[in-house]
Image (cartoon, rainbow, N blue to C red):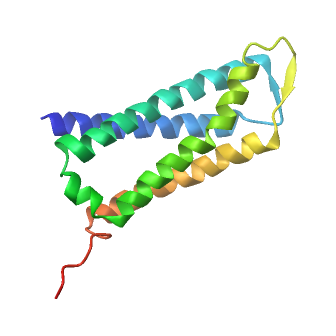
Amino acid sequence: MSYVLIKYLHIIAIMIMMACLCLEHFLLKPQLSATEIRKLAVIDGIYGLASALILGAGLMLWFGVGKGQAFYSANHLFHLKVGLFVVLGLLSIYPTIFFLKHRKTEAETTTAPRVIILLVRIELLLTFLIPLFAVLMAQGIGLPHPAQ
C-alpha cells in the first residue's frame, strides 16, 4: 500500500510541476506588472514545493518501497531522468531569484530579462522528455543485457 501511495504522490507532484511550468510559460512576457510578478512568484513557489515532493517520493521509490535500488540503478535511462531533473532544478534558480527579488516591487512594470523566458521554455521542453524515459524504462529499455 505504501508503494501505491508514494507512487501516486510522485505522479500528482509531477502533474503539479508541469502545470506550474505551463502557467509560468503563458504568464511570462517582456513587460510584467507587479501583480503578474506576484502571481509568478506564487506559481514558482508551488513549482518548488512540487519539485521537492517529486524528489522525496522519487528517493523513497528508489531506495525504499519501489522496485528496488538495483532495478533503478542498473538502468541508464533512469540516470538520464535523474540528471534531467537536476538540470531542471539548476535552470530554475535564476527565474526563482528574479521572481522573489521583484515580487514586492513598487514599480508599475518590470522588464523580464529574455533569459528568464528562455530558461522557462527550456525547462518545459526538458520536462516533457522525462515521461518518455519513464515509458521506455517501463518497457525494460535501458537495462543491461545479460551475457549470452
- Say whether residue 36 is left or right of residue 129: right
- Say whether residue 139 is left or right of residue 14: left
Q: Is residue 89 above or below residue 81?
A: above
**Residue at the spot x=80%, y=27% of the render?**
32
**Residue at the spot x=52%, y=31% of the render?**
47
Closest to the observer: 115 or 146? 146
- Say whether residue 121 is left or right of residue 14: right
**Residue at the spot x=18%, y=39% of the render?**
3
Residue 121, given in percent of the width and then of the height, sits at: 66, 48
Residue 87, given in percent of the width and then of the height, sits at: 55, 49
Closest to the observer: 35 or 54? 54
Q: Kindly indicate the quadrant of the structure image that contains residue 4.
A: top left
Q: Is residue 143 above or below residue 14?
A: below
The N terminus, quarter of image: top left
Toward the bottom, the furthest residue is 148
**Residue at the spot x=47%, y=27% of the render?**
49
Residue 53, given in percent of the width and then of the height, sits at: 38, 32
Residue 102, given in percent of the width and then of the height, sits at: 76, 20
Q: Is residue 73 above or below residue 10?
A: below
Q: Kindly indicate the quadrant of the structure image that contains residue 22.
A: top right
Q: Is residue 46 above or below residue 104?
A: below
Closest to the observer: 74 or 121? 74
Toward the left, the furthest residue is 1
The C terminus, quarter of image: bottom left
